[in-house]
């Protein structure tokens, strides 16, 4: 099994934001192996004909020289509630296939749909997404993410969101939130109620 993976959004046969995935994969192999990635996503990703229509999720497991690809039609999970979980030891700086630590935290969610991980009092991520908070007309993402997502990176580069410290105790000061990742792109007019975040 490969130690690293990427999740890539495919829309009508076209892979989305490959440049951002390429950068993160290169950073991950440097961090994990200490050597450069030898894969070029633009050449590697080859969408099968049966997945050339609609919204598709590509899971690409990889190492330095090789990868495996698994395609599946995608429907987003319905996430309405988050349980805040404090963990001072968690680290997930690269998208690794070993998610056992996150899975243990996720099992503590109770009746909530997902978790919101808090480290040193600061908001980080859910179990598989970055989080954005709405303040007035501005969208803010915590500057303490566990994993710097590709959608998050794109939104920062595009000036659609900004980074700021978000303390657990300040969540109630925001007007709403939404969750984003490669498969769940930013929706400017989609706002979830912060009352859906449970302590």
Image (cartoon, helix red, strand yellow):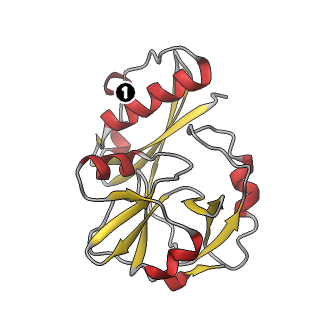
Q: Residue at x 62, y 43 (%)?
A: 92
| Frontmost residue, 79 versus 50 | 79
Graded by Cα atoms within 10 Å as few (under 14), some (14 to 19) or many (20 or more), the crowding at tag 1 reads some
Quadrant occupied by the N terminus: top right
Left or right: where does residue 195 sit relative to residue 132?
right
- The residue tagged 1 is 41
Residue 44 against residue 102 in the figure, above or below: above
| Frontmost residue, 159 versus 106 | 159
Left or right: where does residue 157 sit relative to residue 95?
left
Q: Position of residue 167 (x, y in %)?
A: 55, 67
Quadrant occupied by the C terminus: bottom right
Q: Residue at x 46, y 54 (%)?
A: 143
Q: Residue at x 57, y 25 (%)?
A: 31
Check disc 1 and report its element: helix, strand or loop.
Answer: helix
Which quarter of the figure has residue 174?
bottom left
Total number of numbered labels? 1
| Frontmost residue, 15 versus 145 | 145
| Frontmost residue, 37 versus 195 | 195
Q: Position of residue 90 (x, y in %)?
A: 70, 49
Q: Residue at x 33, y 22 (%)?
A: 43
Q: Position of residue 85 (x, y in %)?
A: 69, 67
Which quarter of the figure has residue 97?
top right
Left or right: where does residue 191 sit relative to residue 77?
left
Residue 93 against residue 57 in the figure, above or below: above
Residue 45 against residue 50 in the figure, above or below: above
Q: Position of residue 94 (x, y in %)?
A: 56, 37
Which quarter of the figure has residue 173?
bottom left
């Amino acid at each position: 099994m490969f130690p690293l993976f990427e999740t890539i959004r495919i829309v009508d046969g076209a892979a989305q934001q490959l440049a951002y995935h390429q950068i993160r994969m290169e950073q991950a192999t440097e961090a994990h192996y200490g050597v450069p990635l030898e894969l070029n996503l633009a050449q590697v990703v080859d969408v099968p004909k049966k997945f050339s229509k609609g919204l598709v999720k590509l899971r690409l497991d990889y190492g330095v020289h090789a990868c495996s690809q698994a395609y599946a039609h995608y429907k987003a999970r319905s996430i309405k509630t988050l349980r805040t979980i404090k963990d001072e030891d968690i680290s997930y700086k690269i998208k690794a296939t070993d998610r056992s630590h996150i899975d243990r935290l996720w099992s503590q969610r109770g009746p909530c749909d997902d978790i919101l991980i808090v480290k040193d009092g600061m908001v980080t991520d859910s179990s598989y997404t970055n989080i954005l908070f709405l303040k007035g007309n501005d969208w803010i993402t915590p500057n303490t993410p566990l994993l710097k997502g590709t959608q998050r990176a794109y939104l920062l580069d595009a000036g659609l969101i900004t980074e700021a410290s978000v303390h657990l105790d300040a969540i109630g000061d925001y007007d709403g939130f939404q969750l984003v990742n490669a498969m769940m792109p930013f929706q400017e007019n989609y706002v979830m109620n912060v009352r859906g975040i449970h302590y």
